[in-house]
Image (tube, grey):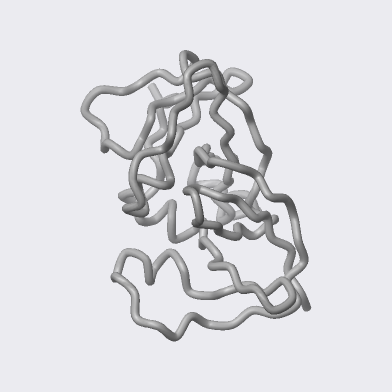
Amino acid sequence: MAEDYFKIRIAKSVRLAVPLTYIETVVSVEPRSICPIPGVRGDFLGVVNRRGNLTWVLDLSRYLGLGYFPHHPGREVTAVVVANRSYAEGGDGAEPKRYLACAVEELEGAFAATRTKAIAKPMKPKLQKLFAKVAYQGARGIAILEPTALFRDLHGPVPDLTAP
Protein backbone atom coordinates (compact mmCIF):
# COMPACT_ATOMS: atom_id res chain seq x y z
CA MET A 1 0.00 0.00 0.00
CA ALA A 2 1.40 3.41 -0.97
CA GLU A 3 1.74 5.99 1.75
CA ASP A 4 1.13 9.69 1.25
CA TYR A 5 3.85 12.22 2.00
CA PHE A 6 4.23 15.97 2.18
CA LYS A 7 7.25 17.34 0.33
CA ILE A 8 9.14 20.28 1.83
CA ARG A 9 12.26 22.19 0.86
CA ILE A 10 14.50 23.17 3.77
CA ALA A 11 17.49 24.54 1.89
CA LYS A 12 18.16 25.66 -1.65
CA SER A 13 18.38 22.16 -3.06
CA VAL A 14 17.42 19.93 -0.10
CA ARG A 15 13.99 18.39 -0.22
CA LEU A 16 12.46 16.00 2.30
CA ALA A 17 9.28 13.99 2.56
CA VAL A 18 7.28 13.78 5.79
CA PRO A 19 4.59 11.11 6.18
CA LEU A 20 1.28 12.93 5.83
CA THR A 21 -0.16 11.14 8.87
CA TYR A 22 2.31 13.05 11.11
CA ILE A 23 1.42 16.52 9.86
CA GLU A 24 -1.13 18.44 11.89
CA THR A 25 -1.09 21.67 9.90
CA VAL A 26 1.05 24.25 8.16
CA VAL A 27 1.43 27.71 9.70
CA SER A 28 2.82 31.07 8.68
CA VAL A 29 4.31 32.96 11.59
CA GLU A 30 5.60 36.49 11.82
CA PRO A 31 9.22 36.32 13.05
CA ARG A 32 8.41 38.71 15.90
CA SER A 33 5.81 36.18 17.15
CA ILE A 34 8.54 33.60 17.76
CA CYS A 35 9.76 34.03 21.33
CA PRO A 36 13.40 32.95 21.75
CA ILE A 37 14.10 30.94 24.90
CA PRO A 38 17.52 31.57 26.48
CA GLY A 39 19.66 28.55 27.23
CA VAL A 40 18.11 26.10 24.73
CA ARG A 41 19.85 24.48 21.78
CA GLY A 42 20.68 26.84 18.94
CA ASP A 43 18.58 25.02 16.36
CA PHE A 44 15.40 26.01 18.21
CA LEU A 45 14.22 29.42 17.04
CA GLY A 46 11.95 29.68 20.08
CA VAL A 47 8.28 29.08 20.80
CA VAL A 48 5.12 30.37 19.23
CA ASN A 49 1.62 30.57 20.66
CA ARG A 50 -0.75 28.45 18.60
CA ARG A 51 -4.35 28.65 19.77
CA GLY A 52 -3.24 29.08 23.37
CA ASN A 53 -0.58 26.35 23.27
CA LEU A 54 3.15 26.97 23.10
CA THR A 55 4.84 25.13 20.24
CA TRP A 56 8.59 24.87 19.71
CA VAL A 57 9.86 26.16 16.35
CA LEU A 58 12.84 24.20 15.01
CA ASP A 59 15.29 25.44 12.41
CA LEU A 60 15.27 22.08 10.62
CA SER A 61 18.00 23.14 8.21
CA ARG A 62 20.40 24.00 11.04
CA TYR A 63 19.42 20.89 13.01
CA LEU A 64 20.43 18.74 10.03
CA GLY A 65 23.74 20.60 9.64
CA LEU A 66 22.76 22.48 6.48
CA GLY A 67 23.18 26.01 7.82
CA TYR A 68 20.80 28.54 9.29
CA PHE A 69 17.22 29.03 8.23
CA PRO A 70 17.15 32.01 5.85
CA HIS A 71 15.24 34.79 7.58
CA HIS A 72 13.94 37.37 5.14
CA PRO A 73 12.94 40.73 6.63
CA GLY A 74 9.20 41.31 6.41
CA ARG A 75 8.51 37.71 5.37
CA GLU A 76 6.63 35.25 7.54
CA VAL A 77 8.22 31.96 8.56
CA THR A 78 6.46 28.95 7.06
CA ALA A 79 6.46 25.89 9.31
CA VAL A 80 5.10 22.38 9.06
CA VAL A 81 3.61 21.39 12.41
CA VAL A 82 4.44 17.75 13.10
CA ALA A 83 2.63 15.72 15.77
CA ASN A 84 4.20 13.12 18.02
CA ARG A 85 2.41 10.20 16.40
CA SER A 86 2.75 7.83 19.35
CA TYR A 87 0.28 10.07 21.17
CA ALA A 88 -1.75 10.94 18.09
CA GLU A 89 -2.41 7.26 17.39
CA GLY A 90 -4.11 6.83 20.75
CA GLY A 91 -1.22 5.85 22.98
CA ASP A 92 -1.92 5.23 26.64
CA GLY A 93 -2.23 8.97 27.24
CA ALA A 94 0.67 8.99 29.70
CA GLU A 95 2.68 11.18 27.35
CA PRO A 96 1.22 14.63 26.72
CA LYS A 97 0.35 15.66 23.19
CA ARG A 98 3.47 17.13 21.54
CA TYR A 99 3.89 19.27 18.47
CA LEU A 100 6.92 20.68 16.74
CA ALA A 101 6.85 23.43 14.12
CA CYS A 102 9.63 22.80 11.59
CA ALA A 103 10.62 25.95 9.73
CA VAL A 104 10.85 25.28 5.98
CA GLU A 105 11.94 27.28 2.97
CA GLU A 106 9.08 26.12 0.76
CA LEU A 107 6.08 23.78 0.73
CA GLU A 108 5.93 21.56 -2.33
CA GLY A 109 2.73 19.67 -1.56
CA ALA A 110 1.42 16.19 -0.95
CA PHE A 111 2.20 13.18 -3.10
CA ALA A 112 1.56 9.46 -3.12
CA ALA A 113 4.77 7.47 -3.29
CA THR A 114 4.89 4.94 -6.10
CA ARG A 115 7.33 2.92 -3.95
CA THR A 116 9.72 3.24 -1.02
CA LYS A 117 13.18 1.80 -0.57
CA ALA A 118 15.60 1.52 2.35
CA ILE A 119 18.60 3.84 2.18
CA ALA A 120 21.66 1.67 1.60
CA LYS A 121 24.36 4.34 1.56
CA PRO A 122 26.19 4.97 4.84
CA MET A 123 25.27 8.21 6.61
CA LYS A 124 26.25 10.03 9.77
CA PRO A 125 24.71 8.22 12.78
CA LYS A 126 22.37 11.14 13.55
CA LEU A 127 21.05 11.14 9.99
CA GLN A 128 20.70 7.34 9.90
CA LYS A 129 18.15 7.54 12.72
CA LEU A 130 16.17 10.24 10.97
CA PHE A 131 16.25 8.95 7.39
CA ALA A 132 15.80 5.21 6.88
CA LYS A 133 13.90 5.23 3.56
CA VAL A 134 13.44 7.03 0.29
CA ALA A 135 10.01 7.64 -1.25
CA TYR A 136 9.74 7.66 -5.02
CA GLN A 137 7.47 9.85 -7.06
CA GLY A 138 8.06 8.34 -10.46
CA ALA A 139 11.81 7.90 -10.94
CA ARG A 140 12.81 10.64 -8.49
CA GLY A 141 13.57 9.67 -4.89
CA ILE A 142 13.28 11.88 -1.82
CA ALA A 143 14.48 11.07 1.71
CA ILE A 144 11.72 10.44 4.25
CA LEU A 145 12.10 12.27 7.57
CA GLU A 146 10.98 9.99 10.41
CA PRO A 147 9.16 12.32 12.85
CA THR A 148 9.19 9.82 15.74
CA ALA A 149 12.98 9.65 15.48
CA LEU A 150 13.11 13.45 15.31
CA PHE A 151 11.13 13.80 18.56
CA ARG A 152 13.29 11.12 20.19
CA ASP A 153 16.54 12.73 19.03
CA LEU A 154 15.57 16.13 20.40
CA HIS A 155 16.52 14.72 23.83
CA GLY A 156 13.44 12.66 24.36
CA PRO A 157 10.08 14.35 24.25
CA VAL A 158 9.96 18.00 23.32
CA PRO A 159 9.90 20.04 26.57
CA ASP A 160 6.39 20.82 27.79
CA LEU A 161 6.23 24.56 28.46
CA THR A 162 2.63 24.36 29.60
CA ALA A 163 3.34 22.17 32.65
CA PRO A 164 3.29 23.95 36.04
Q: Against 164, is 63 above or below?
A: below
Look at the image and tell me whether residue 100 can be seen.
no
From the viewer's perspective, tell me whether residue 159 is left or right of residue 125: right
**x%, y% of residue 156?**
35, 51
Instruction: Single out the residue that lies furthest toward the front.
Output: 12
Look at the image and tell me whether residue 5 can be seen.
yes
Residue placed most toward the observer, 120 or 86: 120
From the viewer's perspective, tell me whether residue 102 is left or right of residue 24: left
Residue at image coords 27%, 36%: 42
**x%, y% of residue 52?**
58, 18
Residue placed most toward the observer, 11 or 112: 11
**x%, y% of residue 91?**
59, 55
Residue placed most toward the observer, 39 or 142: 142
**x%, y% of residue 100?**
50, 40
Name the image quarter holding residue 122.
bottom left
Residue at image coords 55%, 59%: 16
Q: Quadrant of the N terminus?
A: bottom right
Residue at image coords 72%, 71%: 137
Name the image quarter holding residue 24.
top right
